[in-house]
Amino acid sequence: MQAVKRAVEISGGDVKPVQFRIEVPYSSEAHGKLFAGSAVHMVVPVDSALEGLARKWVRSEDLDLRRDAVRALGHFENDENIALVRKMLDDPGFYISGASRIYDVRKAAYAVLQKWGVDAAEPIVEEPVTQKRREPEQESAEDDSPQSAPASNDTFPYLVILVVVVIVVSACVALLLLRRRNSP
């Protein structure tokens, strides 16, 4: 709240301050207090405090916080931020959506660099889940073929065993119940 008041004071109250919406990290105390079954967001002023925080957030373990950090840095074009955002083009974090791996931080970084007019190679921002992730040292100019991996075949035997166990246990319970009902 103090940051908002400070932004209004700086603007003299005549100009609406530029705002930035950030997703509150799940692991934070604020999220714990504000969570009501949906996402928790904060709206903060775009000022030097946000830039300083965003520079720290790019090193966070939290994928959403790194994405928001890149988006926040998009309001502050300078050489240091260009270098930070450029590094985020290789961010390893992803989430699964349907049958795809989505690299949200990379996508945000590329969008910011494009907005700034910085020349950068477009990163992989989505790939099939069944495709084996390529490590940077594995990539080579002469090998453009996708690396395929079996689609979770290692869990299939466990699922079969689980189904068989459930059927056998159900049959045993049914026999015991029949036996009890038929006994004098």
Image (cartoon, grey):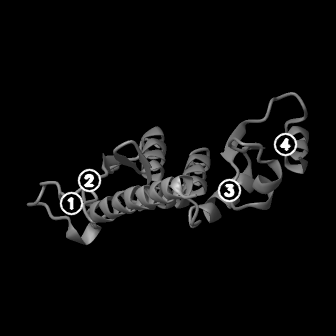
Task: Please name the amino acid that badge 4 sits on.
Answer: Ala
Question: Which mark's residue is nearer the viewer, 1 or 4?
Answer: 1
Q: Which residue is mark 1?
A: 149
In three-dimensional space, the C-alpha distance between marks 3 and 2, rounded to whole angstroms, equals 28 Å
Residue annotated with mark 4: 7
* Amino acid on which disc 1 is placed: Ala
CB within 8 Å, label 2 to label 4: no
From the image, tell me which residue sits under label 3. Answer: 26
Q: Nearest to the eye among marks 3 and 1: give it.
A: 1
- Mark 2 or mark 4, which is nearer to you? 2
Q: Is residue 38 visible?
A: yes
Q: Earlier in the sequence, mark 1 or mark 4?
A: 4
Q: Nearer the viewer, mark 3 or mark 2?
A: 2
Circle 2 sits on which residue? 130
State the SS at label 3. Answer: loop
Foreground residue, 66 or 24? 24
Q: What residue type is disc 2 on?
A: Thr
Disc 2 is placed on an element classified as: loop
For the residues bearing labels 1 and 2, Cβ distance under 8 angstroms: yes
